[in-house]
Amino acid sequence: MTWVLVAASSAVVAYQFHTSPLTGAFATMAVTAAYLAGSGLAGSQPWSLVLPYGLWLAVEGASARGLSLLVRRGARAADRMVAEAERVRRSAAVADARRADEREYLAALHDTASATLLMVGSGVVLRRETWLCEQAARDLDVISGRTGQVDGELDLVMVLRDVVERVPLRIDWRSVEPVPVPATVAVALGHSTREALTNVVRHAGVDAAEVVVIRRGVTVVVEVRDRGCGFDPGQVSDHHHGVTRSLVQRMAAMGGHARVESAPGRGTLVRMEWPDERS
């Protein structure tokens, strides 16, 4: 056992991981033959000791080749698993994006054309109204995607004033001015406020509502209150689109939250809060 045997063993093992099986086998035989020939020429050890070392080199080469094949097979299996996991992740991301897009479209349809048509169908509008024609035109722009995306900041008060001016209710308006918020937040709060006012028109049995826009610390608060017939929130299904999607889920999606307080005969309060983390 000399440094020559250690070097020969290292060479035999290394060849199996970096060459083809045929080249590795040839290298093993060549190194083994060279070792035996060198030992014979040196004459320092009897052949009864040298031959087992030569056989050991051949066994090392075969074992290293087997280990190399197992490692490569495991690596290919791992690559396939990683590729399959990535394919599944990509498919799930696409499906999530598609569902999110569908939910947003359904929410826009519910908040616009569906709500307008339902008011007409339920007898809320009994004659031709100018505001109804204008509302139908805006609904068409929203569901056809012609409104576009808004960036930057908007004054929430101005956005909500535009909303309340377009509903057939007498509005008692209370607010501080201005209330600058990101445009996406202003648009979402505008849609939610319109949904709350639409519910007043459809269900409350009154022709007036109160809208409040205030800041409480760093939190922007929008409240819509009516003195109508009210309802029991516990009896509303979680799948009810107006409450769960247009209000609660929409506010949750932008980091805020919404709460609906009501009771039969005691009116309804919709409170929407958004924490302004920029403050």
Image (spheres, rainbow, N blue to C red):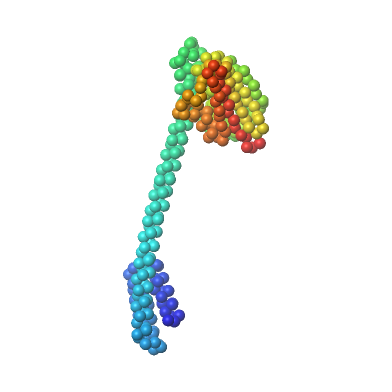
Lateral position of residue 78 relative to residue 250, left or right: left
**75 or 239, nearer to the observer:** 239
Q: Residue at x 38, y 59 (%)?
A: 74
Q: In front: 77, or 240? A: 240
The relative height of residue 254 versus residue 41 in the rendered view (above or below) is: above
Question: Where residue 49 sits in the image (x, y, percent)?
Answer: 37, 84
Image quadrant where residue 12 sits: bottom left
Residue depicted at 52% across the width and 30% down the height: 248
Q: Quadrant of the C terminus?
A: top right
Above or below, comparing residue 27 to residue 188 in the picture: below
Coordinates of residue 133 in the picture (x, y in percent): 50, 17
Closer to the camera in the image, 200 or 188: 200
Q: Quadrant location of residue 208?
A: top right
Q: Is residue 13 shown above or below 116?
A: below
> Where is residue 87 shown, x and y percent of the image?
40, 47
Image point 43% across, 35% down: which residue?
A: 99
**Left or right: where does residue 30 sit relative to residue 180?**
left
Residue 201 at x, y = what percent?
52, 17
